[in-house]
């Protein structure tokens, strides 16, 4: 990105963007961002200058040619105390991409028409861009009223006609002359009315700041600017920088809004963010600063047309404008109104986002899009596109929780929230959706997983009667290979919650990592009598481990003992020592009564056992963390 003119920024940031804490800023619920729109040379920059006393054009070439080329910025405070930041956009058709970058993140539009020129070609393009972006709040300003006063009413009629059926059709119309000051006081009153009626921004939301400028200031480092529409930025925040060439965490070194330092900045506001240890050459217009781990980064998304050309018109390669980003996309139309677009590079998007499409090289809006799905299903079967189009046609704009859950079988509530969906409380969920921990589960899928788990355990235990059960990991893998796979969470605890619920609903028992049918006991066959005799002997004397000869006489080899251990009948210690699973706890009750620390010999005497048994037993207790070895001869009980 080119380096902007920055005299004012250098003075302020060099004085305040240091490692010392910034003073609190003035931004808050009374701040608003308004973007201009309208045909070239209709007086947008002059109007902004008259309202703010600031020159929005930043480049020498703009001042020389009297033509806005890139985004300009200025601000003022209304008599009511509301603070207004203007984003002045270029009106020339050659700079449509820059215009969309300024208008994209703005919540309010100021549409400018010159009385002496009337409605013109680029007026229609800007109107269409506003409609495509879903900007519903704004005002119309008819400028240059002093040049041709007789044309004012005609221009008003043109405006009403051209805006009919668009989001701005009922917007107030104000007539001004920026050079004489005529109508400016009325315009200020209307600005107050429009901003007073605006919905309050969501200060609790996650941050997504689309970057429109990035540059370096000596003594401060890298600075990026953008329009903050939701969430709150704080000095010291760690954010995710996702962009064209970077995807990493960055730290906010300092903040400014309206050329003043701030400890925090709330929406809606223009904000300058000083980033620590981040080269400016790594940043570009269209990159975004995000609340960490809060946004899906997506390449494919399903959309609905809101205006413009039919999506099945045969155009497949287009340019998408989202926030301040401009990204080539491939469009696969499902019907005239629904399609899948694949982005040339991934972006942080959510359901409800608005996108402007234009053909490469075109200076007109091709279509406006509403994002319906940021995690769309694969389309691999014949006719899948047509079926997907029918599904999307019936989807409400706020999203379809039942459809989202049913398609996946189960999905974590937090995942749907990340996608931008409003997930209701449990009582308001569709009756087909169950809640398991943090999961939303489609009841038919849950029933299928329960039946699959039950069948798997029954089948495995019938085939291997000596087995103590089926490992829970085996059940999880089997369910993930099912026709409707069990999804896996990034959190092992969440996955385990789901598995535990499935096991419980299947009426199965779980213990020692094994799942079994109720009352199942491993069939030891011929070894059963020998294991029963060992159990009886250890019940009478838990520290008198059977000798190897005793085990051979009972027909108990390594295989039989391994099966018995898995069944929870015995515990194998080092050196071939066999004890009861209850022996370690029984030993701890005795050892806790000894004077601490104790020696191996003292433990042997207290337990009335042999050195062959006591040493592997103590090593087992060490491995459990119940005792701690101090040196070659001493241990102590861990309290």
Image: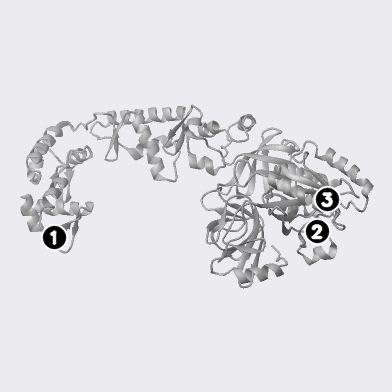
> Which quarter of the rendering shows the C terminus?
bottom left
Query: How far is mark 2 from mark 3, CA to CA?
Result: 19 Å
Q: On the picture, is 397 further left or further right than 454?
A: right
What residue sits 80% from the left and 65% below the top?
61
| Pointer 3 residue | 39
What residue sits 43% from the left and 37% below the top?
480
Image coloring type: one colour
| Pointer 2 residue | 50
Q: Earlier in the sequence, mark 1 or mark 2?
A: 2
- Mark 3: which secondary structure? loop
Q: Earlier in the sequence, mark 2 or mark 3?
A: 3
What residue sits 16% from the left and 47% below the top?
584
- Mark 2: which secondary structure? helix
Image x and y of residue 211, in percent: 64, 56
Q: Residue furthest front?
A: 80
* Marks 3 and 1 close (CB-CB < 8 Å): no
Nearest the viewer among 43 and 430 is 43
Image x and y of residue 230, in percent: 60, 49
Residue 597: image tag:
1
Image x and y of residue 372, in percent: 62, 38
Q: How many marks?
A: 3
| Label 3: how many Cα within 10 Å (few below 14, some 14–19, many 20+) | many
Quarter of image, res 520: top left
- Mark 1: which secondary structure? loop
Viewer-nearest of discs 2 and 3: 2
């Amino acid at each position: 990105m080119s380096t902007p003119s920055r005299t004012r920024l250098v003075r302020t940031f060099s004085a305040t963007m240091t490692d010392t804490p910034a003073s609190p800023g003035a931004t808050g619920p009374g701040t608003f961002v308004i973007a201009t729109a309208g045909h070239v040379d209709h007086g947008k920059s002059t109007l902004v200058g008259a309202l703010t006393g600031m020159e929005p054009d930043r480049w020498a070439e703009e001042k020389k040619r009297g033509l806005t080329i890139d985004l300009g910025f200025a601000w003022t405070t209304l008599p009511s105390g509301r603070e207004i930041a203007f984003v002045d956009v270029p009106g020339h058709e050659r700079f449509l991409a820059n215009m969309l970058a300024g208008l994209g993140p703005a919540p309010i539009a100021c549409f400018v028409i010159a009385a002496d020129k009337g409605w013109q070609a680029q007026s229609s393009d800007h109107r269409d861009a506003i409609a495509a972006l879903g900007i519903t709040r704004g005002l119309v300003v008819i400028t240059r009223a002093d040049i041709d006063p007789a044309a004012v009413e005609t221009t008003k009629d043109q405006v009403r006609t051209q805006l009919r059926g668009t989001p701005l059709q009922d917007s107030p119309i104000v007539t001004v002359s920026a050079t004489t000051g005529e109508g400016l006081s009325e315009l200020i009153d209307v600005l107050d009315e429009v901003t007073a009626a605006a919905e309050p921004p969501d200060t609790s939301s996650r941050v997504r700041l689309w970057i429109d400028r990035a540059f370096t200031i000596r003594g401060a480092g890298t600075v990026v600017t953008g329009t903050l529409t939701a969430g709150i930025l704080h000095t010291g925040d760690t954010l995710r920088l996702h962009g064209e060439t970077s995807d990493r965490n960055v730290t906010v070194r300092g903040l400014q809004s309206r050329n003043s330092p701030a400890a925090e900045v709330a929406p809606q506001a223009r904000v300058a963010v000083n980033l620590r240890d981040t080269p400016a050459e790594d940043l570009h217009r269209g990159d975004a600063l995000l609340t960490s781990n809060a946004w899906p980064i997506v390449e494919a998304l399903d959309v609905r047309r809101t205006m413009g050309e039919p999506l099945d018109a045969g155009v497949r390669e287009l340019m998408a404008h989202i926030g301040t980003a401009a990204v080539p996309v491939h469009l696969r139309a499902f019907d005239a109104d629904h399609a899948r677009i694949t982005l040339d590079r991934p972006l942080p998007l959510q359901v409800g986002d608005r996108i402007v499409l234009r053909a490469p090289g075109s200076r007109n809006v091709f279509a406006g899009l509403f994002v319906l799905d940021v995690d769309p299903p694969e389309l691999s079967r014949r006719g899948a596109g047509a079926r997907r189009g029918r599904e999307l046609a019936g989807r409400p704009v706020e999203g379809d929780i039942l459809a989202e859950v049913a398609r996946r079988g189960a999905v974590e509530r937090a995942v749907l929230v990340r996608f931008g969906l409003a997930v209701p409380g449990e009582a308001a969920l569709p009756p087909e959706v169950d809640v398991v921990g943090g999961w939303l589960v489609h009841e038919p899928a849950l029933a299928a997983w329960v039946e699959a788990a039950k069948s798997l355990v029954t089948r495995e235990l019938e085939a291997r009667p000596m087995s103590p059960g089926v490992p829970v990991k085996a059940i999880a893998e089997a369910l993930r290979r099912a026709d409707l796979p069990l999804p896996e969470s990034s959190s092992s605890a969440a996955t385990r919650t789901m598995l535990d619920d499935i096991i419980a609903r299947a009426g199965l028992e779980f213990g020692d990592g094994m799942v079994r049918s109720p009352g199942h006991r491993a069939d030891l066959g011929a070894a059963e009598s020998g294991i029963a005799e060992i159990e009886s002997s250890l019940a009478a004397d838990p520290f008198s481990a059977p000798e190897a000869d005793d085990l051979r006489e009972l027909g108990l080899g390594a295989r039989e003992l391994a099966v018995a251990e898995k069944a929870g009948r015995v515990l194998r210690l080092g050196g071939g020592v066999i004890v009861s699973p209850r022996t370690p706890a029984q030993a701890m009750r005795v050892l806790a009564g000894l004077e601490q620390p104790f020696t191996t010999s003292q433990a042997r005497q207290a337990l009335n056992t042999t050195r062959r048994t006591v040493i592997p037993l103590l090593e087992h207790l060490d491995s459990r963390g119940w005792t701690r070895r101090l040196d070659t001869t001493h241990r102590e009980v861990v309290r």
